[in-house]
Structures are given as C-alpha cells and as structure tokens.
C-alpha cells in the first residue's frame, strides 16, 4: 500500500513538473518546486532507511564522484556532441537531481524492498523511473534513462547508499 | 564480489545505451523531440528531413479567419489574427511553408535552425502582424532572434521579438512573408555560450573525477583495510 502511494505520488510530481516546465517562464520554478516536492516522498523515513546514514561517508562521496564519471563518460568521449544547457537551469538541475534520488532510490526503493526484497526494489524503482521520464524524453532516449536508473539502483543495493547516487546524479546534470 | 560484478555489468550496459543516443538526456532539459535538420550538425545522429506545411484560410465577409500555419513536424508555426490578410476579394488565402534545401550562412549571422520559406496568396495587413514561433535544438547555442529576408542570400533583418515562448522556442512578429531562420549575431557572444559545464571542458571534468577517485580511493582503501569497520549502514 505504501509502495503504491509513493509510486503514484512520484509519478504525479514528475509528470506535473514536466508539463508546468513547458509553460513560458515557468521552467526554472517548475524544476525547483518539482524537485523539492519529490523529497516529500521520503517523509516518515529515517536517514538510514533511505541510505543516508553517516558511516563510511568518505567512501560514499568517492563512490558518488565515480558514478558521476561513469554517467558522463559517454558524453565526454564525444565532445562535439554535448548539448548546450542554459546556465540558468543549474539550480533546477541540482534540486531535481537530489529530489529524484531521494524519491526513486530512497523512498520508493525502501518501500518496494519492504514488500518484495532487493530484486523488486531494484527492478521496480528502475521501471517507475523510466515511466516517469516518458513525458520529458523522446522514446529513443528511454533505454539510456532505464540503464542509468538500473545502475543507480544497483549501487543503492550493493552499497546500501544513497549519497553516491545523489552526488553522481548532481555531477552528471551539472557538467552537462 | 558478486555485487561489484553486477555493478560493473550495469555500468557497461549504461555506457552502451548512452552511446546509442545523443548525449545530454539527463532530466529532460532538452527539447522533447529531436530537431529535424536540413544540414544536420555532426553530433545530430539519425536525422529526419524537416517537413513543409500548407494551410487554407477562409475569408468570411471579406475578413480572413484566424488560423495557424505550421510544418508537419511543428518546427515552425505562424499564427494569424482575424483580418490578418489584405484579401482583395479572395474567398480564401493559402499559406505554404517550405524548408529551404540549402543552409545559407550570411556574414555576421550564425543560424541555428533551418531556413524556411513562407509564402501566401495574399499579403499581410501591416496593422495585424503574424506571430512566428520557431523551435530550435539544444545541439547549437540558443538564438537571440528570428531573422527574415526576401531572398535566400539576404539581406537578413532581425525581427522584433515577441513574448517569451516555451523552452527551446523563439517567438517574433512579422508583417511580411519571405525567408525565416533563428540565429544570433556572430559578432556578439553566443547566447548559449554561458554554460554550467560540459562542452570542451567535459573530458577534463571526467578526467579530474577519475583522478580524484583514484587518488582519494587508494588511501581510503588502505585505511579501511587497517581498520575494518563493523558498522552496517542502512
């Protein structure tokens, strides 16, 4: 029940954010408010349940930097192909990155893990992550989106950590 | 060990999937559909040719109806107010939008979209200019305006910009038909040049990240081996 509610809440947040961001002059506001709203999915969870405990913090930060490098590598190898992102969207990129990680790999992962263990948490969070991006990405991009979601969810499972995915996601979005 | 192997497989899977699409899909900051180029830039990947558009506008009681002409791929839309045309007894007005087969590069201007030719069977009423919306790609710098010319080789004039459009669109008003393209003055700084990161710096950023991971990871790993942690973080 909790997993379903969290999933629906996240989808509504993500799709609303995309639709509102398409309105003239509302892009940055939609990103910031939408990203912050996603964090509400974690209400009632302890930091440890979300993978935000403080132990091995240095290693987890390092893991986040490594994840950022992995996420950026395909773009870095094709310098000329890197798109131009307006600088004004930087704040939005940071807030959305944090919100999405807290929602998908934090709250949703924890809720699904309680229901069906790690396999359901990994696959379920990856599937919902991909569905959540259907409105904002052309269909041909969804394979890469799903693969990124799977990598981040596997990190969450393997290292019981959300600091790495948050940092990696923020680095990747900002660098692009 | 099994977890590390799975992570490695996922990383490789991601690299392959990300390699197959244009970079920069993170969080959908780009346009929702890839731009259809007449002359695609090298990084565009698979490309569809841009579409043309055709519209017939009714004339009722000597006044042309409100309507919008657009290309089938939606990359150029021109909106007309009621009475936007000087109809001179016509019962209908036809508007045609055709992407130019070539890509002019006039001196002093950098175009970041295709050039479109817009023609109509009646001239516009200068008191009721048409609203022109052009979609642009995130593979080139943001345009600063829409330029218009009566011939493909110029001269090109910048149209007065209208209200802000949706992301990755630019809006202007025009009182005449002709050739249209979005771009920026080559002498001015590129509007899209102010960047968060990426571009030519991206390989350096990634190399720096890898160096940090290696340099900081070694001592952390050594410390961890010497002082095995018993904590089980959630």
Image: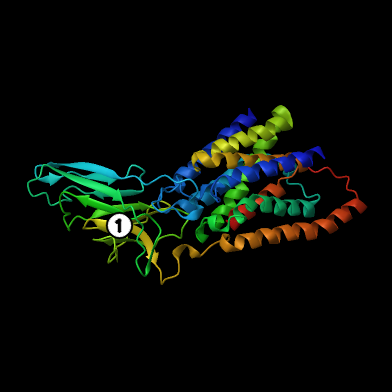
Snapshot quadrant of residue B12: top right
* A105 relative position to B184: left or right: right
Where residue A164 sits: x, y (%)?
Answer: 71, 49
Q: Looking at the image, which residue is at 69% across and 50% down?
A: A67
Mark 1 lies on a secondary structure that is strand
> Does A81 appear above or below B106?
above
Snapshot quadrant of residue B183: bottom left
Q: Is residue B187 visible?
A: yes
Question: Which color scheme does this rendered protein use?
Answer: rainbow
* A126 relative position to A62: left or right: left
Residue indicated by mark 1:
B180
* B123 relative position to A112: left or right: left
> Does A40 appear above or below B207?
above
User: Which of A8/B32 is in front?
Assistant: B32
Q: Looking at the image, which residue is at 25% across and 52% down?
A: B118
Where residue B149 sits: x, y (%)?
Answer: 26, 62
Where residue A174 sits: x, y (%)?
Answer: 59, 56
Q: Is residue A102 visible?
A: no
Q: Residue furthest bottom?
A: B187
The C terminus of chain A appears in which quarter of the rendering? Answer: bottom right
Chain containing mark 1: B
Snapshot quadrant of residue A132: top right
User: Which of B217/A96 is in front?
Assistant: B217
Q: Looking at the image, which residue is at 58% across and 52% down?
A: A95
């Amino acid at each position: 029940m909790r997993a379903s509610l969290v999933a629906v809440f996240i989808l509504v947040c993500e799709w609303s954010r995309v639709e509102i961001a398409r309105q003239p002059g509302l892009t940055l506001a939609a990103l910031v408010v939408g990203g912050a709203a996603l964090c509400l999915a974690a209400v009632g969870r302890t930091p440890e349940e979300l993978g935000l405990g403080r132990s091995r913090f240095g290693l987890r930060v390092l893991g986040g930097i490594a994840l950022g490098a992995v996420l950026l590598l395909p773009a870095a190898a094709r310098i000329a192909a890197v798109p131009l992102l307006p600088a004004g969207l930087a704040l939005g990129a940071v807030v959305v990155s944090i919100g999405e990680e807290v929602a998908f790999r934090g709250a949703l992962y924890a809720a699904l893990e309680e229901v069906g263990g790690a396999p359901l948490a990994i696959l379920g969070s990856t599937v919902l992550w991909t569905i959540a991006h259907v409105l904002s990405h052309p269909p041909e991009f969804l394979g890469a989106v799903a693969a990124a979601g799977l990598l981040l969810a596997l990190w969450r499972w393997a290292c019981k950590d959300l600091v790495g995915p948050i940092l990696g996601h923020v680095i990747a979005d900002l660098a692009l | 060990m099994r977890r590390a192997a799975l992570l490695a497989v996922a990383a490789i899977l991601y690299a392959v999937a990300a390699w197959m699409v244009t970079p920069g899909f993170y969080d959908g900051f780009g346009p929702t559909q890839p731009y259809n180029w007449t002359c695609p830039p090298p990084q565009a990947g698979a490309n569809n040719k841009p579409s043309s558009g055709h519209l017939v506008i009714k004339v009722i009681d000597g006044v042309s109806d409100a309507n919008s002409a657009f290309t089938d791929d939606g990359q150029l839309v021109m909106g007309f107010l009621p009475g936007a045309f000087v109809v001179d007894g016509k019962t209908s007005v036809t508007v045609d939008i055709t992407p130019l087969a070539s890509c002019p590069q006039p001196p002093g201007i950098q175009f970041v979209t295709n050039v479109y030719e817009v023609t109509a069977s009646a001239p516009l009423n200068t008191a009721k200019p048409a609203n022109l919306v052009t979609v642009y790609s995130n593979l080139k710098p943001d345009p600063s305006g829409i330029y218009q010319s009566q011939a493909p080789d110029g001269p090109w004039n910048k149209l007065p910009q209208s209200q802000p459009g949706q992301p990755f669109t630019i809006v202007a008003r025009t009182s005449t038909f002709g050739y249209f393209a979005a771009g920026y003055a080559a002498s001015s700084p590129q509007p899209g040049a102010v960047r968060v990161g990426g571009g030519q710096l991206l390989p350096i950023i990634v190399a720096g990240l890898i160096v940090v991971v290696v340099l900081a990871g070694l001592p952390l790993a050594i410390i961890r081996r010497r002082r095995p942690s018993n904590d089980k973080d959630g």
